[in-house]
């Protein structure tokens, strides 16, 4: 992945020294850049979206972009790390409103995933989508993706432990594999049937480990 796209050099542009007054005045443009990039990256993928497209969508000057973000790669990492992109916390908040039984929460997790893939703006998992586009096997973006996947897996393993299920570590890995299948499968076939199948499989795994 090039640091800058849209026909620009891959060399990062230097950022000017920030001041308190300039940082305050630029807070609006920074948020517009991140909001524009979030929408464009999720809908079109990180590779297809260039810096010039983000700048035009955010309605900011190029100098403003490079004041806040060293490069497109830097922006991708910030996008992946943002609260809005991290769907795990949104799922946890939703399922914990439904029950405090960890065994129930494991299956509710898949119910909420089904709701996600049935939404009109579903375009897959931003982490899996980005991972498929990354050309390097390492780097900051790859690390953020791996860390997020680890967070999902650890959460499921923690629920399995709290529910007193057998082999919770392995069960969590298996359930996480189902989660990735929900996103990839639903995006591929264009409906929620993979989510329904994953929920059924998760129930079978949970029951077998009880």
Image: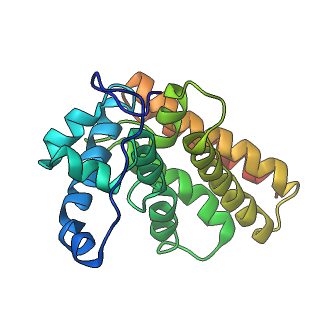
**Residue at 35% from the left image edge and 36% from the top image edge:** 123
Is 123 displayed left or right of 27 in the figure?
right
Q: Is residue 204 above or below residue 94?
A: above
Position of residue 134 measured from the top left corner of the image (x, y, whole percent): 53, 29
On the image, the x and y values in percent for residue 75 come to 39, 47
The quadrant of the rendering that contains the C terminus is: bottom right
| Observer-nearest of 101 and 159 | 159
Q: Is residue 94 above or below residue 119?
A: below
Q: Residue furthest right?
A: 167
Give the total of numbered labels: 0
Locate residue 208 relative to residue 8 in the image: left or right: right
Q: Position of residue 87 (x, y in %)?
A: 46, 55
Q: Is residue 209 left or right of residue 78?
A: right
**Residue, x 29% and y 31% (percent of image)?**
50
Point out residue 105 in the picture as x, y percentages from the top left corner.
60, 64
Q: In the picture, residue 199 is in which quadrant?
A: top right
Instruction: State whether residue 53 appears in this view.
Output: yes
**Residue closest to the eye, 181 or 66:** 66
Residue 209 visible within the image: no
x 19%, y 59%: residue: 29
Rendering quarter of residue 151: bottom right
Residue shown at 55% from the left, 74% from the top: 99
- The answer to which of 196 and 51 lies nearer the viewer is 51
Q: Is residue 13 left or right of residue 31?
A: right
Q: How is the image coloured?
A: rainbow
Residue 47 in which image quadrant: top left
Give 151 or 90, whichever is nearer the viewer. 151
State the residue lying farthest toward the left: 59
């Amino acid at each position: 992945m090039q640091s800058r796209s849209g026909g620009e050099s891959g060399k990062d542009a230097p950022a000017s020294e920030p001041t308190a007054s300039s940082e305050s005045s630029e807070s609006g443009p920074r948020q517009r850049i991140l909001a524009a990039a979030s929408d464009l990256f999720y809908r079109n993928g990180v590779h297809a979206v260039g810096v010039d497209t983000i700048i035009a969508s955010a309605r900011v000057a190029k100098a403003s972009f490079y004041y806040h973000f060293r490069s497109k790669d830097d922006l991708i990492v910030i996008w992946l790390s943002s609260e809005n992109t991290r769907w795990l916390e949104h799922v946890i908040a939703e399922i914990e409103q439904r029950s405090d039984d960890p065994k129930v929460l494991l299956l509710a997790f898949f119910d909420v995933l089904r709701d996600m893939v049935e939404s009109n703006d579903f375009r897959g998992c931003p982490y899996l989508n980005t991972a498929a586009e990354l050309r390097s096997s390492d780097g900051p973006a790859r690390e953020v993706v791996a860390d997020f996947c680890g967070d999902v897996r650890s959460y499921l393993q923690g629920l399995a432990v709290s529910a007193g299920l057998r082999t919770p570590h392995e069960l969590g890995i298996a359930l996480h594999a189902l989660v990735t299948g929900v996103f990839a499968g639903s995006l591929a076939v264009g409906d929620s049937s993979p989510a329904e199948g994953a929920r059924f499989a998760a129930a079978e795994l949970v029951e077998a480990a009880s």
